[in-house]
Image (cartoon, helix red, strand yellow):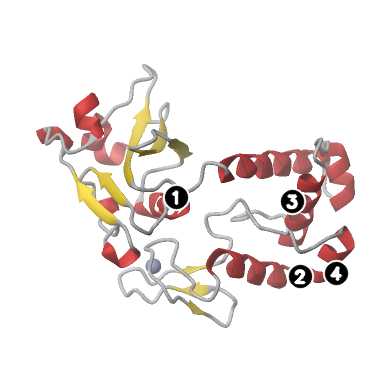
Amino acid sequence: MVNFSHFDSVFALTSHFTSNEVCKDFLAQQRWGDDVVCPYCGQHHCYKCNDGRFLCPNRDCHKKFNSTVGTIFEASRIPLTKWFLAIYLISSHKKGISSHQLGRDISVTQKTAWFMLQKVRSCFAQDDSVALEGEVEIDEAYVGGDNKWRHEWKKKKHGQGGANKSAIFGMIQRDNGHVVAIHVPNTTKETIIPIINQFIEVNGTTIYTDESVIYKTLTKENGYKHFTCNHSLKEFKCWWCRYQ
Ligand SMILES: [Zn+2]
């Protein structure tokens, strides 16, 4: 979540964030500082392009991205200037702000304001649980009608679990049992890697996964130590094998 602590009034905020470009630059500065990291593969030192986006220098990845990628602002049609003002207003109304009030304050419909409130609140809640570290186990699973966690879905590979199942990506820190579990639209590398980067501290962290190709980029290049475990052989290197 963006940090507006050095703006002490609505006036200070709105006089600074006069365009979406200013907002995007601020977002990039807050996320990465001077070393822009690719949200897809973890490559450092991404370049800024003329169109304001960033380009990953890793030849295998080479993706272009905005500073909004992986945030609540990504793919939103609501201008960043309104998002920023909304976040400021929501966080300064300690007792809560209604969607009607927020809608009037930032000139959007009540419905839009309600949607924004949900998004911003879910981020505030997530911020507390960020940064799993030490030894972290991660895995994806589809939760089916029978509500059981399964690994078998991987054998059905491209079926992606079927329409009535939703994918969950889970991360657990071994020493304290902290869990972050997130509903994901799919379990591709493009979806999963940014989530790992967001929730798992890079420095000194060891990640345990199965042998799925989506984890291949979790190498020393992006700072994680990475161990794999073949669940079907029951190698018992990980908790999934030991406790299932
Ligand atoms: Zn990349």
Cα–Cα span, label 3 and label 2: 16 Å
Quarter assignment of residue 57: bottom left
Q: Amino acid at mark 1?
A: Ile
Q: Amino acid at mark 4?
A: Ser
Classify 10 Å Cα crowding around label 1: few (below 14), some (14-19), many (20 and above): some
| Marking on residue 195 | 1
Q: Amino acid at mark 3?
A: Ile
Q: Position of residue 94 (x, y in %)?
A: 80, 40
Cα–Cα span, label 4 and label 2: 10 Å
Looking at the image, is 204 positioned above or below residue 161? below
Look at the numbered discs 4 and 1 and tell me whether their residues touch, using CB distance below 8 Å: no
Q: Which residue is mark 4?
A: 15
* SS state under label 3: helix
Q: Which residue is mark 3?
A: 87
Cα–Cα span, label 3 and label 1: 22 Å
Q: Which residue is mark 2?
A: 19
